[in-house]
Image (cartoon, rainbow, N blue to C red):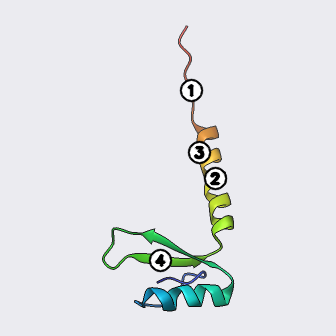
Amino acid sequence: MVEDEGKQLGIMPLPQAIGLAREQGLDLVEVAPTAQPPVCRIIDYGKFKYEQDKKDRQAKKATHHSQVR
């Protein structure tokens, strides 16, 4: 479990983690489901998704497309 600011909270049961996220008004997001134990983060999912989309758009814009004549 990792907090929004990056502080590690350690291993905790799912209900406790969900409760902690709700107290802060944020979302509990599983970022590494294949890890043992799975890694979750307390973040604002809407903001996280927006930042990811913005990063993807920048990466797509930076790619160079060659044209065959």
Vertical comparison of 34 with 11: above or below? above
Please give the residue where the numbered disc 1 appears in the rendered image.
65
- Residue 40's disc is 4
> From mark 3 to mark 2, how far is it between C-alphas?
10 Å
- Residue 59's disc is 3
| Comparing labels 2 and 4, the label whose residue is closer to the camera | 4
Query: Given the current orientation, which residue lies at the most extreme left position?
Result: 36
For the point 64% across and 39% down, the residue is: 61
Q: Which is nearer the eye, 14 or 50?
A: 14
| Comparing labels 1 and 2, the label whose residue is closer to the camera | 2
Position in image of residue 2 (x %, y %): 50, 82
Labelled pair 3, 1 in contact (Cβ < 8 Å): no
For the point 50% across and 92% down, the residue is: 16
Q: Which is nearer the eye, 8 or 16?
A: 16
Give amino acid for label 2.
Answer: Asp
> From mark 1 to mark 2, how far is it between C-alphas?
21 Å
Give amino acid for label 1.
Answer: His
